[in-house]
């Protein structure tokens, strides 16, 4: 586990150092994120594909909420790396085809903090830390890893959390069938104000609005 973490940290640091030497701070962030995504894709194609969809949903949701392009870009990149901490999980957990045991879930729940450790290799990625660390916090304070609640949860994390939940619900796994877009929107509305930020969850549900074609359009 520690060896895998160190390898990813070195990859991020090397990419950041190369771009820093070339004097392009904006492209540094993009290059480092893409390097991390390439590493994730080699470990787990499902998680990488999920992260790319979450990034697209999050950017669209930020715009739906009236945020500017800076926030849209922030949550897009944050969405891309929100699960990067899972790269340090052993294959027996990360690639397990069936449901996880309670002990395995405890290991998975460490991925937000591990993700922050990975991002720490590149200072240019500091703005993405909130989305990575707190995308599993809940509006009612029952989330993890820090038990933040309501508006104490940074907006970027609240946006990515809703995008993450929607994609997880509407994606099939070997051990579960996907929910329809309409079913997922109903769950988001039901959990608004308890699990998720009510404004973000409501806006996401309104944006999707049960229309299957819209899901595909958002991913283009």
Image: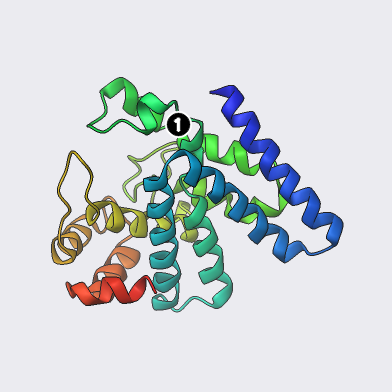
Q: Quadrant of residue 34?
A: bottom right
Say which residue appears at 58% left-offset and 40% top-offset. Answer: 116
Q: How is the image coloured?
A: rainbow
Q: Nearer the viewer, residue 102 or 50?
A: 50
Please give left or right for residue 67 compared with residue 13 in the image: left
Q: Is residue 4 above or below residue 60?
A: above
Q: Is residue 63 above or below residue 88?
A: below
Residue 54: percent from the left, percent from the top? 39, 59
Helix, strand or loop under label 1: loop
Q: Residue furthest front?
A: 42
Q: In this figure, which residue is indicated by the disc labeled 1?
A: 110
Q: Quadrant of residue 202?
A: bottom left
Q: Nearer the viewer, residue 202 or 6?
A: 6
Say which residue appears at 45% left-offset and 29% top-offset. Answer: 89
Other residues around mark 1 within 10 Å, as few (<14) / some (14–19) / many (≥20): some
Please give left or right for residue 154 compared with residue 139 in the image: right
**The C terminus is located in which quarter?**
bottom left
Say which residue appears at 22% left-offset and 32% top-offset. Answer: 98
Residue 117: percent from the left, percent from the top? 61, 36
Please give left or right for residue 110 compared with residue 99 in the image: right
Residue 42: percent from the left, percent from the top? 50, 42
Q: Is residue 111 above or below residue 21?
A: above
Q: Quadrant of residue 187?
A: bottom left
């Amino acid at each position: 586990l520690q060896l895998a973490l160190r390898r990813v940290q070195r990859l991020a640091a090397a990419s950041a150092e190369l771009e820093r030497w070339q004097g392009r701070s904006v492209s540094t962030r993009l290059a480092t994120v893409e390097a991390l995504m390439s590493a994730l894709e080699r470990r787990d194609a499902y998680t990488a594909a999920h992260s790319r969809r979450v990034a697209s949903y999050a950017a669209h949701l930020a715009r739906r909420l009236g945020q500017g392009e800076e926030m849209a870009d922030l949550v897009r990149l944050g969405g891309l790396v929100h699960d990067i901490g899972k790269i340090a999980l052993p294959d027996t957990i990360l690639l397990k085809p069936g449901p996880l045991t309670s002990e395995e879930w405890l290991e998975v729940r460490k991925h937000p903090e591990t993700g922050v450790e990975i991002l720490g290799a590149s200072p240019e990625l500091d703005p993405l830390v909130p989305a990575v660390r707190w995308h599993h916090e809940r509006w009612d304070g029952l989330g993890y890893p820090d038990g933040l609640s309501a508006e104490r949860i940074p907006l970027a994390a609240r946006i990515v959390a809703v995008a993450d939940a929607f994609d997880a619900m509407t994606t099939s796994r070997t051990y579960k069938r996907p929910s329809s877009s309409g079913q997922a929107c109903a769950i988001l509305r039901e959990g608004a104000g308890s699990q998720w930020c009510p404004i973000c969850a409501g806006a996401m549900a309104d944006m999707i609005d049960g229309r299957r074609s819209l899901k595909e359009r958002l991913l283009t």
